[in-house]
C-alpha cells in the first residue's frame, strides 16, 4: 500500500470516528428522556416522540458511518437530519442554523467521498 493510500485511509477513519462520535453523543440526550432536550423540542413545536425519533436517526447515522459499506447511508441520514434542524432554526427563529448547516455539509461531503471510493476504487 502506498503512503498516499495509507494517509487517505487514516484520514478517512479519523473523520468517520469524529462524525460518528458527534452524532452518537448528540443523539443520546434525545433518546434518553432529558428534560432540557424535551423542553427545547417543545419550544420548536415538536413533541417528545419526535425528539426520540431524531435521536434514533442521529445515533443510527453515526453508527452506520463506522461501517464502510454503509457509511454513505449513515452520512445521508445525518445530513438530512441536520438540514431539518437548520430549517427548524430558521422557521422558528430560535437558535442559529449555522452549526446544523456545517454538520450537514461535512456529512454530505463525507458520504460523497465514500461513494466515490466505492464507485471508482482505482482512482489516481
Image (cartoon, rainbow, N blue to C red):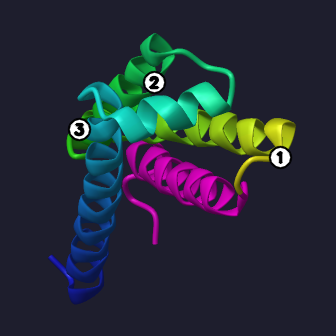
Which of the two discs, 3 and 1, labels the residue nearer the N terminus? 3
Q: Is residue 34 visible?
A: yes
Q: Nearer the viewer, residue 9 or 44?
A: 44
Query: Residue 51's mark?
Result: 2
Give above or below for 23 relative to 8: above
Q: Quick check: 43 left or right of 16?
A: right
Element marked by disc 2: helix
Element marked by disc 3: helix
**Pair 3/2: label in front:** 2
Predominant SS along the magenta part = helix
Residue lying at 20% horizontally and 78% vertically, measured from the top left: 6
Q: Nearer the viewer, residue 33 or 68?
A: 33
Q: Is residue 72 visible?
A: no
Residue lying at 71% horizontally and 45% vertically, measured from the top left: 86
Q: Quadrant of residue 87?
A: top right
Q: Position of residue 8 (x, y in %)?
A: 31, 75
The count of marks equals 3
Kindly identify which residue carries mark 3: 63
User: How packed is label 1: few (under 14 Cα within 10 Å), some, or many (20 or more)?
Assistant: few
Give above or below for 116 relative to 61: below
Residue lying at 23% horizontally and 65% vertically, measured from the top left: 13
Q: CA distance from mark 2 to mark 1?
A: 19 Å
Residue lying at 42% horizontally and 50% vertically, measured from the top left: 114
Kindly identify which residue carries mark 1: 93
Residues tagged 3 and 1 counted as in contact (Cβ below 8 A) = no
Part of the protein shown in magenta: 96-124
Q: Is residue 112 magenta?
A: yes
User: How packed is label 3: few (under 14 Cα within 10 Å), some, or many (20 or more)?
Assistant: many
Which of the two discs, 3 and 2, labels the residue nearer the N terminus? 2
Q: Quick check: 61 left or right of 90?
A: left
Amino acid at each position: 500500500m502506498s503512503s498516499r493510500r495509507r494517509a487517505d485511509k487514516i484520514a478517512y477513519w479519523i473523520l468517520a470516528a469524529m462524525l460518528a462520535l458527534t452524532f452518537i453523543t448528540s443523539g443520546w440526550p434525545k433518546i434518553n428522556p432529558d428534560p432540557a432536550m424535551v423542553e427545547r423540542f417543545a419550544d420548536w413545536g415538536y413533541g417528545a416522540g419526535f425528539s426520540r425519533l431524531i435521536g434514533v436517526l442521529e445515533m443510527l447515522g453515526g453508527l452506520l458511518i463506522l461501517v464502510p459499506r454503509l457509511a454513505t447511508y449513515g452520512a445521508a441520514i445525518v445530513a438530512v437530519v441536520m438540514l431539518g434542524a437548520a430549517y427548524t432554526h430558521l422557521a422558528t427563529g430560535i437558535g442559529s442554523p449555522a452549526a446544523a448547516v456545517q454538520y450537514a455539509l461535512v456529512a454530505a461531503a463525507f458520504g460523497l467521498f465514500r461513494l466515490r471510493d466505492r464507485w471508482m476504487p482505482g482512482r489516481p
